[in-house]
Every structure is written in C-alpha cells, then in structure tokens.
Image (cartoon, helix red, strand yellow):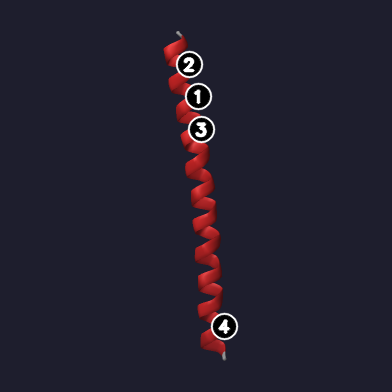
Amino acid sequence: MSFRHSITVILSHTMEIVNIYNIKFNIYSLIKIIKDSMKISH
C-alpha cells in the first residue's frame, strides 16, 4: 500500500517537473519565434 502510494507521488512529481519544463521550453520557443519575425520585419 505505502509502496504504491510512493510510486503515485513520484509519478505526479515527475509529471509536474515535465510540465514546468515544457512550459519553459514553449516560452523559449515563442520568444525565439518573435525575435526571428522581428528580424524579418526590420
């Protein structure tokens, strides 16, 4: 029971970390796209 619980906790933390990483990566990509489009417009 406690073993299963710990696996569930570890999985949920891993998913949180992955989500945070994905959000940061998406923001980085968005900034890169914006900078590239600004270069094209100038």
Label 1 element class = helix
| Location of residue 36 with respect to 31 vertically, above or below | below
Cβ atoms at labels 3 and 4 below 8 Å apart: no
| x 45%, y 8%: residue | 1
Q: Position of residue 5 (x, y in %)?
A: 48, 16
Q: In whole angstroms, how far apart are the C-alphas of marks 3 and 2?
A: 12 Å
Q: In whole angstroms, how far apart are the C-alphas of marks 3 and 4?
A: 38 Å
Q: Position of residue 20 (x, y in %)?
A: 54, 46
Q: Which residue is mark 1?
A: 9
| x 54%, y 55%: residue | 24
Direction top: furthest residue: 1
Cβ atoms at labels 1 and 2 below 8 Å apart: yes
| Mark 2 / mark 4, whichever is N-terminal | 2
| Mark 3 / mark 4, whichever is N-terminal | 3
Q: In whole angstroms, how far apart are the C-alphas of marks 2 and 4?
A: 49 Å
Cβ atoms at labels 1 and 3 below 8 Å apart: yes
Label 2 element class = helix
Give the residue type at disc 4: Met
| x 54%, y 52%: residue | 23
**Which numbered disc covers residue 13?**
3
Label 4 element class = helix
Q: Which residue is mark 4?
A: 38
Give the residue type at disc 1: Val
Q: In whole angstroms, how far apart are the C-alphas of marks 1 and 3?
A: 6 Å
Q: Which residue is mark 2?
A: 5
Observer-nearest residue: 10 or 36? 10
| Location of residue 10 with respect to 38 vertically, above or below | above
